Image: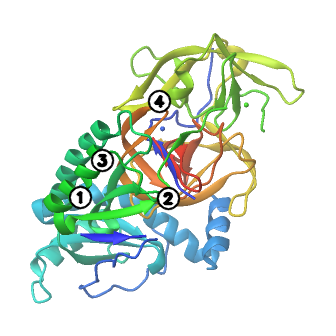
Amino acid sequence: MTIVGCAAIGVGCAALPEQPMSSDDDGAEAPKDIAERAPTPRQPIGALIPLDEVVGLARERNITAAEAQVRLQWQQRAPALVDAAQASLGEAFGGVWIDPSDGDRVKIGVTALQSGNTKLSAVARGAAETVGLLEAHDVVRVQHSLHELERANAWLSDEVARVNQGASEHLSAGLRIDRNAVYLHVPVSGDLSAEQRALVALASATLDDALVIDARANKYSAYACTYPFCDPPLRGGIRIMNAAKSCTGGFVARSNVDNKLYMMTAGHCGFGAQGVWWTDFQDSSAHNIGSTWHWEWNSGGDMSIITVDNVAGWSPRGWVEVTAGPFTTANSQYPITSTNWSVTGQRVCTTGSFFGRSDCGIVQELSVTATYGGVTVNNLAQTNLCGINGDSGAPIYSSNVAYGMLVAGLNVKLILN
């Protein structure tokens, strides 16, 4: 066990691909590389990256635009590497992550790997080659398999939900793939109930060196309150309102069930929403979108969908309004072309309708369990994106791919669903 001294959480989602329309640092030591490092590729891998994202990452990392494009293309391939490496390595698979401190190289964790044993290294190398990351990966020795960590995190998440009920302060838990550990976050105030203290002790004894206890300000707040408005087409990243609350409209999506169009937002925005959701045009005139069709704010997630009642008038598109920020360029027609799972260390961006600008950050933790608004939610991801109240539902994206929605955050830390 190791004790260590701006994060948001979000949920995953599927979004509407862009197309015309008709009527979702701590002190722990990182594992060491043990395999010979391949040279950085000279040519980009895979699809072209939007120029504004290339420029943004180049500024953020202080690198050339050519190198930024290469790194963003690595990130595009990383989710596929998770599947390929897990299938090839089986129980020896320790996860995949991106290391921003090491030139955004992609790491493959392998258990029981000895410096003289090249067999597993070759298997991992083969998986990287199949997804076009042969020259962008490193094999890293880790203590625990991903399967082992996932089992431990599932048990801990259930226990966190149990002991947080009625408590004044909350525990949270999640997977730090890059640290090869399950993280149990405890409030820095130390104000724990007897059940919470018992769980911390039990987890420490049970999980041993697979657990890291992290003390921090640990009270999450849901980001829902009353930026930017757009004329049609309807798109993500805009402010939406109803009689009870204000949030951010997420991705526009087409249902696989009824083939209708819906706008996504956070589930706690749909909870208690009264009547029709509306937004403004740029002339400040209000226009109805539709009503909450379904919402979930429970252990399974935090997401809801809103009907688009006037499809012909709104002409919805798979766009996000990206606003200008330190590492983003304004683009009111930023296209979303696909969806995917996020990877630890991956760079993602978000546009909340209250924060005032788009922001970019790193995916830090996966399979997070957190309590906010009196509800414990599983299957979240934590980032260091920035946001404020009202940014709930904000789309999270990178390289035209949808990864999830912003749902809650700490004082300086935010959460994805």
Circle nearer the N terminus (4, 1) = 1
Placement of 35 over or under 219, stated as above or below: below
The residue to which callout 2 is attached is 47
- 398 to the left or right of 76: right
Q: Which mark is residue 303?
A: 4
Which amino acid is tagged 3? Gln
- Seen from the viewer's position, the closer of residues 405 and 226 is 226
Which amino acid is tagged 1? Ala
Which residue appears at 64% of the width and 79% of the height?
62
Circle 4 residues within 10 Å: few <14, some 14–19, many ≥20 = many
Q: Is residue 12 visible?
A: no
Q: How far from the left and from the top, in percent, is residue 294?
A: 47, 17
- Seen from the viewer's position, the closer of residues 13 and 149 is 149
Q: How far from the left and from the top, in percent, is residue 25?
A: 46, 71
Circle nearer the N terminus (4, 2) = 2
The residue to which callout 1 is attached is 84
What's the coloring here?
A: rainbow
Gap in Å between the C-alphas at discs 2 and 3? 48 Å
Gap in Å between the C-alphas at discs 3 and 4? 28 Å
- Seen from the viewer's position, the closer of residues 270 and 344 is 270
Asked if the residue under mark 1 is in contact with the one under mark 4, i.e. CB atoms within 8 Å, the reply is no
Circle 1 residues within 10 Å: few <14, some 14–19, many ≥20 = some
Gap in Å between the C-alphas at discs 4 and 2? 30 Å
The residue to which callout 3 is attached is 196
Q: Secondary structure at mark 1?
A: helix
In what quadrant of the picture does the C terminus appear?
top left
